């Protein structure tokens, strides 16, 4: 509860600052928000030491050490997004409405918190909508660009459609169990799946699949990522996706845990194979960097789902670790794209040809991000993939071995297109369109933090050990 | 004649399927939005009927419906705002115009 209250305080302060301060002071809105949020993030780690298991709203809301930790991980990601977006928020066109940007972003985060902590479907739906509706407004933020509007329409229509499908599934679950509490539904459903329950689970997976951009439901992803302002894209790709993955795990384990092997293991199995493969194959032919990262994030979502299908403590820990590493690697890549886009407006992969000659530090950052996303050993991405495969294999069935093998083969495919970017920057001989430039210190700070994360998270083993210890003690999978 | 649960569930199912069909086939963005509203209303109807007929002792389904209506209203308001924004740029609300970004 402490974190939600803290976030509300941050939101109200930013809102009051933006509304009542004189015009001159508004130039500091970005710095003010970043500072406040940094303090809040640090206090979140403090709350980890104090917070024991808390329930509120008659058991609708629950928090524990592991839930506080996933919120802290998301906070770190949001902080990096905020710092990286300072320059964009202060640019001439956006500066009039930058207060709105920060307010919408904080409201979204609040919805995400509710979604993660909810133990009742009513609160979950409210959190889900509070997390996805303001995001649509953020996607439409770039008013002068047509693409931004197009992306927003595509996002809002698919988001509403998916939540309608999700709620239809919930109505079937309600008919079968007579309650909306996760724990009560779990007891009331018994152990024999009915046809109605299979339909309900399929609807729930489809609804969450839209949020996670799993493959049969991924069609909005690339367009929205390309059209949205880059700051919003980076937020959408790491924070929104990471939180939805964790919430999905909680629902599948705590509500439908009994029917794991009977019903939804096979649904998820097919979805994971499709997600990883299709994401990879489409990423190969992309020419726009943001679109390229959109398809790469689709296939990364497939890897994250391996932590859900594992359904054991290692799976939970490795899922959280994967989200943490993914935040740093993806935000490093988006940081570079954003710095170049803010300065020159180029986002095509061809524009990056020979970038190493003009901007060596940016291209090294991009290279580290690509290596980490592809999973090349000394960097964090390798360890996150390794742990998530370990978690899946510990589940023990032959089918899962095959699944991990397919995922491994796909890792090799993904190496090809991640290295295409590196090749463009370092090997392609063309004259570089992008002149040598110095990025803003906020962008540099964000990239330094990301690079530190990419290098240290893998080598320093205490991060994963802490997460594993926590998940061994937690009750996220208590129903198993 | 006794009105059983089925008399409510079949219209609700038909509404939901019409909504999905409309979402896929309609070319006007406002019509797509109306189709989605149909789907959401089918969900509301389902919850109310299940609550009334299967679990008359409690109110959880009714409360969920109330919140779902409010959420649907918020979604529609935002979607219409975005569509109006797009209309100002494109002078049309047909989805064939939304084809600048694909594949």
Image (cartoon, grey):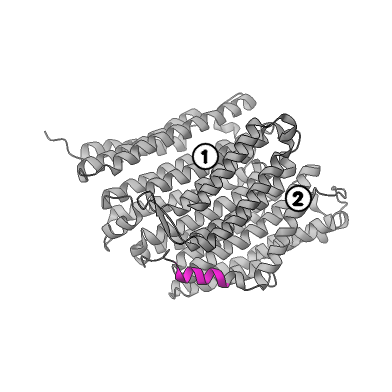
The disc label shown at residue A56, or none: none
Give percent across and percent down for residue A142: 67, 35
Q: CA distance from mark 2 to mark 1?
A: 27 Å
The disc label shown at residue A443, or none: 2
Magenta span main SS? helix
Please state which of residues A28 and A201 is positioned toward the viewer in this rendering.
Answer: A28
Chain for mark 1?
Answer: A
Give percent across and percent down for residue A472: 46, 71
Give percent across and percent down for residue A423: 78, 61
What's the residue at 64%, 52% (across, down)?
A39
Q: Nearer the viewer, mark 2 or mark 1?
A: 2
Crowd rating for badge 2 (residues with CA inside 10 Å; few <14, some 14–19, many 20+): many
Quarter of the N terminus of chain B within the rendering:
top left
Residue under pointer 1: A133
What's the residue at 68%, 47% (across, down)?
A34
Q: Determine whether A210 is above or below A474 in the image.
A: above
Q: Determine whether B5 is above or below A460 in the image.
A: above
Residue A446's image quarter?
A: bottom right
Chain for mark 2?
Answer: A
Whether the magenta-drawn stretch holds residue A317 is answered as no
Which residues are the magenta region? Answer: A465-474
Give percent across and percent down for residue A268: 44, 60
Lateral position of residue A3 relative to residue A147, left or right: left
Residue furthest to the front: A50
| Secondary structure at numbered mark 1 | helix
| Secondary structure at numbered mark 2 | helix
Which of disc 1 and disc 2 is earlier in sequence?
Answer: 1
**Could you tell me how many numbered marks the image carries?**
2
């Amino acid at each position: 509860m402490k974190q939600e209250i803290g976030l509300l305080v941050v939101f109200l302060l930013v809102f009051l600052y933006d509304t009542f301060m004189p015009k001159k002071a508004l130039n500091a809105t970005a710095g003010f928000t970043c500072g406040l949020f940094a303090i809040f993030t640090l206090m979140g780690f403090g709350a980890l030491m104090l917070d024991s298991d808390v329930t509120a709203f008659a058991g609708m809301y629950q928090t524990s050490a592991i839930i506080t930790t996933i919120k802290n991980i998301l906070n770190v990601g949001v902080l990096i997004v905020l710092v990286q977006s300072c320059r964009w928020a202060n640019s001439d066109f956006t500066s009039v409405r930058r207060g709105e940007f920060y307010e919408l972003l904080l409201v979204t985060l609040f919805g995400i918190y509710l979604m993660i902590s909810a133990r009742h479907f009513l609160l979950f739906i409210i959190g889900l909508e509070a997390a996805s509706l303001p995001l649509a407004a953020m996607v439409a933020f770039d008013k002068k660009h047509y693409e931004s509007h197009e992306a927003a329409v595509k996002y809002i229509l698919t988001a509403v459609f998916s939540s309608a499908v999700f709620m239809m599934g919930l109505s079937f679950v309600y008919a079968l169990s007579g309650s909306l509490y996760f724990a009560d539904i779990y007891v009331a459903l018994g152990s024999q799946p009915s046809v109605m329950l299979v339909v309900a689970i399929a609807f729930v997976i489809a609804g969450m699949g839209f949020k996670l951009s799993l493959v049969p439901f991924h069609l909005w992803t690339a367009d929205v990522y390309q059209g949205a302002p880059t700051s919003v894209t980076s937020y959408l790709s790491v924070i929104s996706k990471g939180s939805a993955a964790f919430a999905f795990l909680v629902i599948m384990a705590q509500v439908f845990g009994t029917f794991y092997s009977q019903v939804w293991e096979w649904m998820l199995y097919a979805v994971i194979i499709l997600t990883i493969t299709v994401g990879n194959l489409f990423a190969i032919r992309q020419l726009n960097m943001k679109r390229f990262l959109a398809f790469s994030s689709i296939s990364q979502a497939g890897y994250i789902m391996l932590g859900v299908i594992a359904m054991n403590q290692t799976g939970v820990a490795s899922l959280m670790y994967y989200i943490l590493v993914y935040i740093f690697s993806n935000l490093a890549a988006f940081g570079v794209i954003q710095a170049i886009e803010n300065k020159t407006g180029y986002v095509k992969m061809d524009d990056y040809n020979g970038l190493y000659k003009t901007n060596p530090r940016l291209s090294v950052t991009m290279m580290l991000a690509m290596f980490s996303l592809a999973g090349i050993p000394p960097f964090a991405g390798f360890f996150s993939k390794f742990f998530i495969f370990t978690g899946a294999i510990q589940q023990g069935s032959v089918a899962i071995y095959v699944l991990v093998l397919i995922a491994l083969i796909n890792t090799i495919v993904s190496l090809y297109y991640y290295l295409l970017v590196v090749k463009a920057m370092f090997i392609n001989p063309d004259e570089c369109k992008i002149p040598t430039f110095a990025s803003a210190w906020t962008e540099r700070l964000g990239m330094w933090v990301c690079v530190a994360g990419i290098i240290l998270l893998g080598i320093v083993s205490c991060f994963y050990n802490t997460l594993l210890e926590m998940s061994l003690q937690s009750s996220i999978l208590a129903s198993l | 004649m006794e009105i059983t649960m089925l008399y409510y569930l079949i219209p609700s199912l038909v509404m939901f399927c019409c909504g999905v069909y409309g979402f896929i086939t309609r070319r006007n963005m406002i019509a797509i939005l109306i189709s989605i509203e149909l789907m959401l209303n089918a969900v509301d109807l389902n919850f109310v009927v299940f609550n009334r007929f299967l679990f008359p002792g409690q109110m959880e389904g009714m409360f969920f419906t109330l919140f779902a209506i409010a959420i649907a209203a918020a979604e529609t308001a935002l979607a219409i705002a975005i569509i109006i924004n797009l209309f100002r740029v494109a002078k049309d609300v047909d989805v064939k115009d939304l084809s600048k970004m694909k594949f």
